Amino acid sequence: MMGSFDENKHFDLQFIDQMSMHHEGALMSSEHMISDSKRPELRQLYENIQKSQSEQIEQMQECFDAAVATLVFCTIPDPLRALREVRRVLKPDGSFHLLEHVKVKRQPIAWIQEKATPVWKHLAGGCHLNRDTVGMLQGVGFEVEQINPYLGGLFLDISARAPEPK
């Protein structure tokens, strides 16, 4: 998939331009793919979308009732910044639902994830095997309400809430 933009000569740039207004998170996670593209029109499109998205998102404050993220916080270059942005645009008491792979608590798996991450992130588009997503959520002020672990805690289904102002 990572090379598909370069290989697809029928890539519909107009369609992407029209749909892109709503895909800031996707852009953040695909930055590596776009920046490595041999097609200058894709890099220019990416820069245009980033500029327009930044302006629109900066104006949003407590706009959304809910947010959903699926397997993105392992790859986002600055996950704390992204989580703060989600919290900023969620209404007080807004819900945030995530499905993420995380660093497990059990040894030796946690040790393996830690040792493999420096190489893995270069092979897998920036993916970090050792991120503590629950800790990061709590660190930016989300109240974690429920965690459902899968595959021995490697994947977590997380329900969190933006706290009410005090």
Image (tube, rainbow, N blue to C red):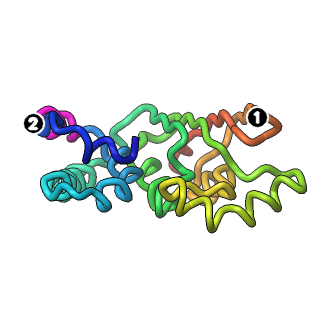
Which residue bears the numbered disc 1? 149
Q: Which mark is residue 119?
A: none
Give the quadrant of the N terminus.
Answer: top left
> What secondary structure is marked by label 2?
helix
**Residue 110 in the figure: left or right of residue 82:** right
Please state if 146 lies on the left or on the right of 53 as rendered: right
Q: Amino acid at mark 2?
A: Gln
Q: Nearer the viewer, mark 2 or mark 1?
A: 2
N-terminal of the pair, mark 2 or mark 1, is: 2
Q: Nearer the viewer, residue 137 or 150?
A: 150
Q: Residues within 10 Å of mark 2 (few under 14, many from 20)?
A: few
| Residue 78 spot, x, y in % from top left | 48, 63
List the residue tagged with mark 2.
14
Residue shown at 63%/68% (left/top)? Answer: 118
Give, as a three-letter code, the residue at label 1: Pro
45 part of magenta stretch: no
Q: Which residues are magenta?
A: 14-21
Q: Is residue 19 left or right of residue 4?
A: left
Picture quadrant where residue 12 is located: top left
Q: Residue at x 38, y 58 (%)?
A: 32
Q: Secondary structure at mark 1?
A: strand
Residue found at x 57% / y 37% = 98
Query: Any magenta on residue 19?
Result: yes
| Residue nearer the viewer, 39 or 158 | 39
Residue 89, x across and y down, in percent:
38, 46
Do the CB atoms of the residues marked 2 and 1 lie less than 8 Å apart? no
Horizontally, is 1 left or right of 38 in the view?
A: right
